[in-house]
Image (cartoon, rainbow, N blue to C red):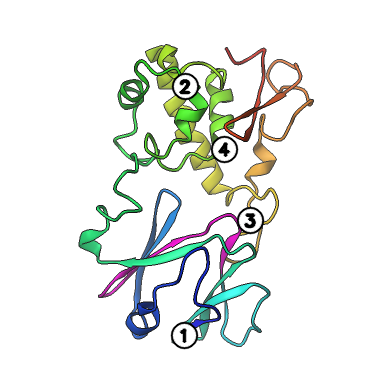
Amino acid sequence: MALMRDNLRFPLPASMVRDLPGLTFSSVSRRSKYLLFYFDRGPVLIWHLGMTGQFHVLSQSSPLGVHEHVRINMENGTALCYRDTRRFGYAGLSTPEALEGHIWFNQLGPEPLGDIFSADYLIEQCRGRRAPIKSLLMNARVVAGVGNIYASEALFRSGIHPGRAAGKISRARMTLLVEAVRRVLCEAIAAGGSTISDFVQVDGKPGYFAHQFRVYAREGKPCFRCGGAIRRMVQSGRSTFYCLGCQH
């Protein structure tokens, strides 16, 4: 392992260089916006990509990339390279047993594709709350992993206005919303994600879900369902796209 710098958003743990060499990758998973690298023994490597962080799988002979900060060489001749233009990413180590109680995870809500996330769960979380439903969907303490793009798309598919008070949504519509969140995320995963500016996959290819957007980044364009113009508003500093004719 080679560190080209000792800090990103926060200092990188010095023990990475000491504890990870010689270990074998066993699996990679995700919790909220964190990547989890598991090994045959020892610690779990936790990595948040920040805004512009990217991992690339390249040959070890590849020249050092622009804004490349960490390179993990593997015995098969490949290298896992971390690049981050803005350096907002960060990393840490944990034992597998302590992972759920880790300070980065202990207040996170359930995963949107997991069994806990359901209409019953979301109704309970939204009960009596006046906050807009889109804000609740993007609150990681309520559900971890629904980003701005996918919240807009799911709300359109379920016919719910993004500004509607979360506690005022019926069970039937909440069921549609949960189903829409799951469907949108599964379609996005199958398409390799959404490349808007600088996101790419580990092989350098873009994600193609942007070609399936029904409302996001389509301000002023006709709605695919009713033909009305897609609108844009700002919620909590983020752009929200919606159709006034289809979402109530």
Among the two numbered marks 2 and 4 on one chain, the one whose residue lies closer to the N terminus: 2
Among the two numbered marks 3 and 1 on one chain, the one whose residue lies closer to the N terminus: 1
Q: Point out the frontmost of discs 3 and 1.
A: 3
- Whether tag 2 and tag 3 are in contact, CB under 8 A, the answer is no
The CA distance from mark 2 to mark 1 is: 51 Å
Q: Is residue 112 left or right of residue 63?
A: left
Q: Quadrant of residue 126?
A: top left
At 55% from the left edge and 36% from the top edge, which residue is drawn? 150
- Outermost left residue: 97
- Magenta run includes residue 54: yes
The CA distance from mark 4 to mark 3 is: 15 Å
Q: Which mark is residue 148?
A: 4
- Which region is colored magenta? 38-55
- Whether tag 4 and tag 3 are in contact, CB under 8 A, the answer is no
At 24% from the left edge and 63% from the top edge, which residue is drawn? 96
Among the two numbered marks 4 and 3 on one chain, the one whose residue lies closer to the N terminus: 4
At 52% from the left edge and 63% from the top edge, which residue is drawn? 9
Among the two numbered marks 2 and 1 on one chain, the one whose residue lies closer to the N terminus: 1
Q: Amino acid at mark 4?
A: Asn
Q: Amino acid at mark 3?
A: Phe
What residue would you read off at disc 2? 131
Count of marks, rendered view: 4
Among the two numbered marks 2 and 3 on one chain, the one whose residue lies closer to the N terminus: 2
Q: Is residue 201 visible?
A: no
Q: Position of residue 197 (x, y in %)?
A: 70, 52
SS state under label 1 = loop
Q: Residues within 10 Å of mark 4 (few under 14, many from 20)?
A: some
